Image (cartoon, rainbow, N blue to C red):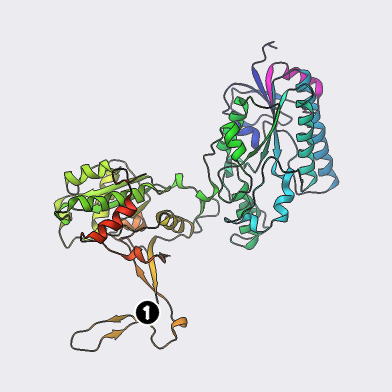
Amino acid sequence: MSSRKDKILITGACGILGTALAGLPGRKIFFDRCEKSELLGDGAEFVQGDVCDYELMRKLLSECHTLIHLAGCSDSRKTDPETQSNIFNDNIRGAKTAFDAARDAKIEKIIYASSNHAVGMYEIENLPVIYKLQHDVKIDENVPVRPDSFYGVSKVFGETYGRFIAENGGPKVYVLRIGSVRDASEDHPYAYAEWGVRKDLWKRGSSEYIEQEERLKAIWLSRRDFLQLIEKALEYDGAMFDIFYGVSANERGWFNLEHTRKNLGFVPLDNSEAWFQIKSKPSNGHIIKPDDVSVAAIIPLKKDWLSENDDFFYKLLAVTIGAAKNSRLVNNVFVATDSEEVSEKAKAFGADVPFLRPKSLSEEDVRVDQVLKYFLERLEDVNRHYEVIVSLDITHPFRPADLIDNMLTMLLAESFTSVVPGMREKRPLIIPREKERAIRIDQYASLRKDREPYFLMLPSLACATLSEFIYKSTRFGSKTGIMEIDFPFCAVEIRNRSPETESLIEKISGKTDRPDK
């Protein structure tokens, strides 16, 4: 063996965590008692053995500068004697053996994979609110350990023994309290819930399913975020001992990532809320993320619609482009215009205008649906494919900041073919008739509180539609959902310039030369 200490020893290499590190930079020795996993790649250096074998560990670590200790029994749910024995041997005895070998080999650093279960009682005592999107529970690296199981106790041992090693001659020890990393085949926040469905423990959509979905959405650490976390821990050269939480940028999480972000420079790329369950798809393929769905926003605007007050209407265009660009789910923003002048303005505001629409599609009797169909077909001709189209009109600029993303989430998560904003209306509704009495169309015979609500649809504000229906020249598919909004200004249509409308647009546009900001 080489006398150079230029390698990294990764224990538990064939497990869920270990296989996520196949692409870790640097020279690595993958170590596991199981046979080599195909996920590690053909060229990976692999040694099969027991982490409790001190002599073997000491020998391997003589070539290494860092130990990444992932090995252990991870079954936190079982309490039978056999499982408890495995946890004691693999997690407590194994960690002590590995750490002792690392100390005696005089390596530089140990990165230890601890667990959320080391502080799991904070979760248990805050059920069920801690799984929801809005709660004020936050725990950081300074809270006392409070394990929720013998598995959690074993992880606390590893943390404590690691501190002892670090504070008594080294090496440095960095503890990563990991939320939950899933197998490569189910690297998404529905993994627990779907596992229960496969095991016939609960049905999809049941209260048990939803609880497991919400829990994992709080503690999920994607495989690419885990890889980044390890890379950052390898680069870090701080205190002799430290603790860092490891979860993705989950909106409902209760682990405070500030310390991890500040000291390691960890910037998680994933957020569990960005994943959707498509109920209409087969059970083995109904979980998707926005990266899997291509979304285009299209803003139709013809030149002869603009008046002599072009600068004002260009501000409306800038605001509308900005609203689309600020969506985290929209991939590209296009303006469908027949004018070179409008095209140049739109590009300056951050939109794309790959081609002009023909003048025949700017006639008065041409519907927006027809313009969208033409534009989508032309995009297909140049190999730009989109599964969802969001259409917007500059005449309705007062959109809530999260409207587009909420509509797309509703479309994807609830299997609608289109989603349109709507304002609830319970006031009397009538249809005027010439030479006869007006016809009332609402449920006038019932009490106001008992009337079935009507909705004023606002497709000019935004309309999200599956592309297959745009090809049929309609924005409203076979199953249209209504995204209820209660902000009255959303219904305001601006077609004329006035001091009042100018003031309103200035307030919402900010710096109109940079609407995407």
Circle 1 — which element? Answer: loop
Q: Position of residue 294 (x, y in %)?
A: 39, 47
Above or below, 482 against 47 in this view is below
Q: Amino acid at mark 1?
A: Arg
In this rendering, position of residue 260 left or right of residue 71: left
Residue 484: quadrant of the picture: bottom left
Instruction: Please state which of residues 174 and 372 is positioned toward the viewer in this rendering.
Output: 174
Above or below, 222 against 374 in this view is above
Q: Position of residue 117 (x, y in %)?
A: 72, 45
Q: Quadrant of the N terminus?
A: top right
Q: Quadrant of the C terminus?
A: top left
Q: Residue at x 79, y 36 (%)?
A: 157
Q: Residue at x 84, y 40 (%)?
A: 85
Task: Report which residue position mark 1 lands on.
Answer: 427
Instruction: Please state which of residues 248 and 416 is positioned toward the viewer in this rendering.
Output: 248
Instruction: Please state which of residues 221 and 202 is positioned toward the viewer in this rendering.
Output: 221
In this rendering, position of residue 135 left or right of residue 423: right
Q: Which residues are magenta?
A: 48-69
Q: Residue at x 81, y 23 (%)?
A: 54
Above or below, 333 against 90 in this view is below
Q: Position of residue 430 (x, y in %)?
A: 30, 81
